[in-house]
Image (cartoon, helix red, strand yellow):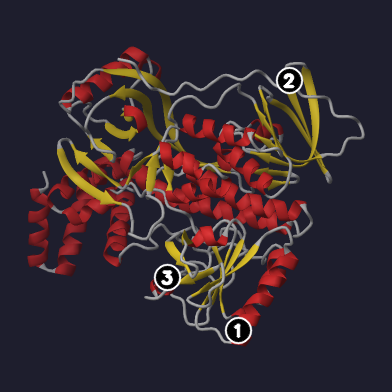
Amino acid sequence: MTSPYFQPPTYKRSRVAEPAPDAPALPVLVVGAGPVGMSVALGLAHRGIPVTVLEAADQVSFGSRAICISRHSLEVADRLGFGEQLSALALEWQGGRSYHRDREVLHFTMPHEAGDVRAPMVNVSQSELEQMMVETLEKHPLITLHWGTPVVGVQQDTEGARVTVDTVEGQRTLRAQWVVAADGGRSAVRQQLGLRLEGTSYEGRYVIADIHWVCDLPAERLVWFDPPSNPGSTVIMHRQPNDIWRIDYQLAPGDDAEVETQEERIRERIAKHLTWLRHEQPWTLEWHGFYQARALALPDFVHGRVVFTGDAAHLVPIFGVRGLNSGMEDADTLVWTLAAVLRGDADPALLAAYSAERHDAWQQNVANAGKSTLVMTPGTDGYRATRDALLHLSEVRPEFSHLLDPRQSSATHARRSPLTLGATDGEAADTGLVPGDPVPDRRVRTAAGKESSVHEVRGTGFGLYAFAPLDEAALESVHRLRGDLASALPHEDAVVVLVGLGDTEHSLVDETGELATAWGAAPGEVFVVRPDGLLLARGRAGDLAGVPAHLRAGGTARAQGAEVADPRVGLPPEQAAREQVWLALSDALDSVEPDARADLLTRLALVLGDQVGPAALRDAVLAAGAAR
């Protein structure tokens, strides 16, 4: 059987010329040619800024690694010019199933509406994603990519940074106005500056493997808790293009990782699971790795003239596939803010706003991924006991199964960002978009009859979406706001999009009011959308006159991380309450010694029975007893 597994090409180490003493500094030096670093390079180059990229390796990463690409990351790919190629290769999926042993306990579907432009999620090997990005970079005249050039030194001053690299001809020192550190979880730039990530490392350990296996299982997230094939473990499977499957399985606390990561042992454990599934078609092991969940970040992502992004700035647990996707969001925000600062269009405080906003996004991701981690790899006896109870209970009481949901990645909000106008900490809207929310891309039709989408009409700059009806004075205010925005940030496009009014190139038909309803737009209201697709502000055009100056100044002095992001935002009230009960009970069990837990639960049952009455308690006991 011939495997179609992707084998990335190897590149020769680049020759890097020694800069002349009087040579001007490079505008931007990006360290790391992973998906995030290349996204930054492409985004800046599209804005006319020359970029030099340094990559320590001689090829893109090998293996599936981060395989799940979110809808928002697909948007970013479209803005960067390789979206069609990515969509043509990737495998779409919309949900998944979880099993306790051999019984289904969860079937989830990610939000997806008929008007959505892209699937909620696609699967593709990170290696293949990176290769198509490399090929896109190589075609851009403003990007120089150096292979085999590891960073060995970083020094800064007020005007920029000097980065020393090893090259095929010896060390070279390159001077740059700005350095973007996108060199991953083991960032050499971070080490050179003496910086450390802070946060939590979880105990759960996973072996990850890619196999070539022809079978008819669907393209969805498949999870087995405590399967008979691997008792006590958790097994995850994802289908990739070309009959490649990603398999992750958890190691027990007492397992020797050195033994368990040997190829013979990996083949043995995978074979047991596939045989148990009654799918005994031949398969080949193509790649394997090892993973431990971590939730770590730098307190600040900007240090002098060095800006950190992606895994170099923060790490999140793998569950919910937020690592690569959050990095793509970082890049999408960083390119327009860094470009504005580099060109002198905005105060450097704009980069401080990037740092505060993306650190808060990391907190949002950790808040959600942390819940997934507590289910996938519970690190304490209390959480292990409640996780196992939930698995049993979900077999007979499906209303509890949402607590097993992997909380798949979705675009983070910027409601607490210093840039966002009109939102407050913890604010949520019953209907419509709140400033700071990602604006969903929906299929639309222009007044000229062209099929398009919300973000395609806007392009890669700012969008001012004005909803009919607008009188002549209001329309004049909209165009004045657009002109002021173009004056404040002259290198960023600003497009006026009229919704339900006029027949210009950027006018949208909204005969049924579907878009106005989805956004919660009032007649005459204007929505200001950022280049990265987030809602900056909304209101009457005359009331938004201060937006351009606000951006140029770098936003407001809103405190970073004023509140930890609440992962329950958007949950129905009964689910949010159930989640709080689960967390509180787990923490209560962990607060006492193991031999005191039965006594605690008995006292708890007596107190709750007194509150709800004997009949309700009797029903609860019967329901709990049936879950065995």
Which residue reaches farthest right? 22
Amino acid at circle 2:
Thr
Q: How many callouts does the rendering have?
A: 3
Amino acid at circle 1:
Ala
Write down the residue under mark 3.
515
62 in relation to 104, above or below: above
Q: Do the residues labelled 3 and 1 touch (CB within 8 Å)?
A: no
Residue drawn at x 55%, y 67% as measured from the top left: 506
Q: Position of residue 168 (x, y in %)?
A: 73, 16
Packing grade of label 2 (10 A; few <14, some 14-19, many >=20) is: many
- Disc 1 to disc 2, how far (Cα)? 59 Å
Write down the residue under mark 1.
474
Write down the residue under mark 2.
167
Residue drawn at x 68%, y 41% as measured from the top left: 180
Q: At numbered mark 3, what does the secondary structure look like: helix, strand or loop?
A: helix
Q: Nearer the viewer, residue 479 or 120?
A: 479
Q: At numbered mark 2, what does the secondary structure look like: helix, strand or loop?
A: strand
Sooner in the amino-acid sequence: mark 3 or mark 1: 1
Quarter of the image with the N terminus in it: top left
Mark closer to the observer (3, 2): 3
- Residue 133 visible in the snapshot: yes
Residue drawn at x 32%, y 55% as measured from the top left: 584
- Disc 3 to disc 1, how far (Cα)? 20 Å
Packing grade of label 1 (10 A; few <14, some 14-19, many >=20) is: some
Q: Where is residue 283 in the image (x, y as percent from the top left)?
A: 28, 19
